Image: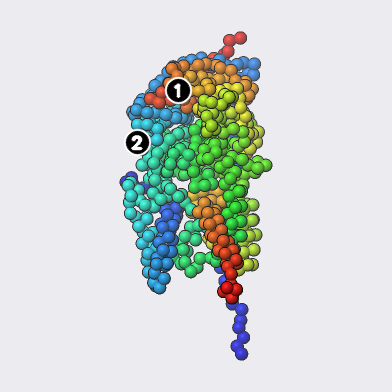
């Protein structure tokens, strides 16, 4: 294994996020398998997962470096959610309504990803390019966060605030603010969870009540 | 009956949000200059320069395969050529090799960067390297942009920017450019950067994950992305090569991408080199338009000459890469005439991936892949054109 060069803060966070991703999965699985286990046990499982990813080698790199080559660095928003899921799952922000989740995923996909990957920018508008000098994004985020605050979605306001802090401090590799706010994992997760919740709600609505049977 | 007071709501989330917005605002760079360093003063407009063939240099071949060369001219008058070398394209042993030329001869060559080094510098697994672009900024800083792949084929590429403190012997600072929105997949480089008026770097890049199109990237001198502009619309295109025409106008010539339906061989119309222009310092580019120069899905190189004309190295064929020629345009790349045939071999030969540069003595340097076996450099003198 080559001796790693001095690490930037963004690289350090990027590697830590690989550990957090595995830790979040491990902690979720542990809590489901051992529902009565003390919280400290779940925390230990998560910490062990992070340590394993950062230290254990596979080939000529650590597990975290291997995974980083595959899934990249998550957005700072995702990183905060992963950290909460791994070490403080009860502090995860409340799940928004299905329509909000699916709508968010759809807007991001249409606005940011479809143009870049199909090479078609309607009216020449490149939303991703705004992220390099993202004053408009900050204004929109401030407005949406204020709305979220008024609706008592305090957890999401805090998550976005921490993500912006990370980007501003140079802890995020990308110079584009979009990459601190959204990534395929959170968008895919929103689409999947939102769709699942909507289907479940529809089934509940059409399920005959016991008194009618 | 006790009175229940309303639960005090923590203001911490709002404080975090305000701090986050303030922090993010602090990272936003100032508006970069949308202006190029204008081309050097031209010879009298009525004088056209002639292209006169000069010497041939075959660069050292330490490995069975060599490809994708790039030329940088240093302030001390020496010339650096970088290419990727290994057992074959995409192999794990591929490294970036460099040679230093002075006075028309190779004075040194060395393995400049390998996969393990890029992996250690970027703290992520790198499975293969490709397309080095070496460039010397006007302030003398030597930059290297190199394509690396962590997973999959070339469409899974990303670009790493490195700077060397010692003329390419070592690379001390590396920064991975995050240019694509989906896991940063599918961004590559091939052609030389362009100096911008404010000291920033204009880097012609391209995107080839799902769709292929050119991407203009403006970077600060330390590799921070300041602006991107897609060369979108038109047919599939890649590997833009850019030459400024003046302070705000530039022309890009692009390789015509295979459209996946047999553009190389079966399309009724011959695929051609594409052209895009900007008149606002690279902030926006026109949709690439077809020229009359055939292009078999192979790279092109562009260079501005002192008489204001443009020189393009390309394979002017519908199929194959066995003919390499220099084309000349006197109307900013709209029309082209053949200036010289550089190589003309059997149909299975390959002379490809050209790079053009002006040497310190004013002559033209052309490097290219010679049958995937080695990198060949040819020089062309500029003389006054016969009346």
Examine the image and state in which quarter residue B33 appears.
top right
Q: Secondary structure at mark 2?
A: loop
Q: Residue furthest front?
A: A213
Q: CA distance from mark 1 to mark 2?
A: 23 Å
Label 1 chain ID? B
Up-down: is B199 above or below B306? below
Q: Are marks 1 and 2 in contact (CB under 8 Å)?
A: no
> Which numbered dot is residue B286?
none
Residue at screen point 63% across, 42% down: A121
- Left or right: B116 with respect to B45? left
Q: Secondary structure at mark 1?
A: strand
- Left or right: A60 with respect to A175? left
> Which numbered dot is residue B93?
2
User: Is residue B9 at least partly visible in the picture?
Assistant: no
Q: Which residue is mark 1?
A: B351
Q: Residue furthest top?
A: B387
Q: Give percent across and percent down for residue B215.
A: 56, 38
Q: Residue furthest right?
A: A123
Residue at screen point 44% across, 27% down: B79
Q: Give percent across and percent down for residue A17.
A: 44, 56
Residue at screen point 44% across, 53% down: A14
Q: Give percent across and percent down for residue B38.
A: 60, 30
Examine the image and state in which quarter residue A144 appears.
bottom right
Q: Label 2: few (<14), some or many (≥20) within 10 Å? A: some
Up-down: is A95 above or below B365? below
Q: Earlier in the sequence, mark 1 or mark 2?
A: 2
Label 2 chain ID? B
Q: Give percent across and percent down for residue B127.
A: 39, 41
Tell me whether marks 1 and 2 sit on the same chain.
yes
């Amino acid at each position: 294994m080559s001796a790693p060069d001095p690490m930037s803060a963004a690289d350090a966070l990027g590697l830590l996020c690989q550990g957090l991703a595995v830790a979040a999965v491990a902690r979720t699985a542990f809590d489901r398998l051992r529902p009565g286990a003390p919280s400290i046990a779940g925390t230990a499982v998560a910490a062990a997962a992070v340590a394993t990813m950062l230290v254990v080698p596979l080939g000529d790199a650590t597990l975290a470096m291997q995974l980083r080559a595959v899934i990249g660095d998550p957005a700072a928003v995702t990183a905060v959610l992963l950290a909460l899921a791994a070490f403080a799952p009860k502090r995860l922000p409340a799940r928004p309504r299905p329509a909000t989740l699916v709508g968010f995923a759809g807007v991001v996909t249409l606005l940011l990803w479809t143009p870049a990957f199909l090479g078609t920018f309607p009216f020449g508008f490149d939303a991703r390019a705004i992220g390099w000098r993202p004053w408009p994004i900050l204004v929109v985020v401030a407005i949406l966060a204020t709305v979220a605050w008024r609706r008592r979605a305090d957890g999401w306001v805090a998550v976005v605030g921490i993500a912006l802090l990370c980007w501003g401090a140079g802890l995020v590799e990308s110079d584009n603010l979009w990459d601190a706010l959204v990534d395929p994992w959170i968008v895919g997760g929103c689409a999947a969870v939102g769709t699942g919740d909507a289907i479940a709600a529809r089934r509940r609505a059409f399920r005959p009540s016991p008194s009618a049977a | 009956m006790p009175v229940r007071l309303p639960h005090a709501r923590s203001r911490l989330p709002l404080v975090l949000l305000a701090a986050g917005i303030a922090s993010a605002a602090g990272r936003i760079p100032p508006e970069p200059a949308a202006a190029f360093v204008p081309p050097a003063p031209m010879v009298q407009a009525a004088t056209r320069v002639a292209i006169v063939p000069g010497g041939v240099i075959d660069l050292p071949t330490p490995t069975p395969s060599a490809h994708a060369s790039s030329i940088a001219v240093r302030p001390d008058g020496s010339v650096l050529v970088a290419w990727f070398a290994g057992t074959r394209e995409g192999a794990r042993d591929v490294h970036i090799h460099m040679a230093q030329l002075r006075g028309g001869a190779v004075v040194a060559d060395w393995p400049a960067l390998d996969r393990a080094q890029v992996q250690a510098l970027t703290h992520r697994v790198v499975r293969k390297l490709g397309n080095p672009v070496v460039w010397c900024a006007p302030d003398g800083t030597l930059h290297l942009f190199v394509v690396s792949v962590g997973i999959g084929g070339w469409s899974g590429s990303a670009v790493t920017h490195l700077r060397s403190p010692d003329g390419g012997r070592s690379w001390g600072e590396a920064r991975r450019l995050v240019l694509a929105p989906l896991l940063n997949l599918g961004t590559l480089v091939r052609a030389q950067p362009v100096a911008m008026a404010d000291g920033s770097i204009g880097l012609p890049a391209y995107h080839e994950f799902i769709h292929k199109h050119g991407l203009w990237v403006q970077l600060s001198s330390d590799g921070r992305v300041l602006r991107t502009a897609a060369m979108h619309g038109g047919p599939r295109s890649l590997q833009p090569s850019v030459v400024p025409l003046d302070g705000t106008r530039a022309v890009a010539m692009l390789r015509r991408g295979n459209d996946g339906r047999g553009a190389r061989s079966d399309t009724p119309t011959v695929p051609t080199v594409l052209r895009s222009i900007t008149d606002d310092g690279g902030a926006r580019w026109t949709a690439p338009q077809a020229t009359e120069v055939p292009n078999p899905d192979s790279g092109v190189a562009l260079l501005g000459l002192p008489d204001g004309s443009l020189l393009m190295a390309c394979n002017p064929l519908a199929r194959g890469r066995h003919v390499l020629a220099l084309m000349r345009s006197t109307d900013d790349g709209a029309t082209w005439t053949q200036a010289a045939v550089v190589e003309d071999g059997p149909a299975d030969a390959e002379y490809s991936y050209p790079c053009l540069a002006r040497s310190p003595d004013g002559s033209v340097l052309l490097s290219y892949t010679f049958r995937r076996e080695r990198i060949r450099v040819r020089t062309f003198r500029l003389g006054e054109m016969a009346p």
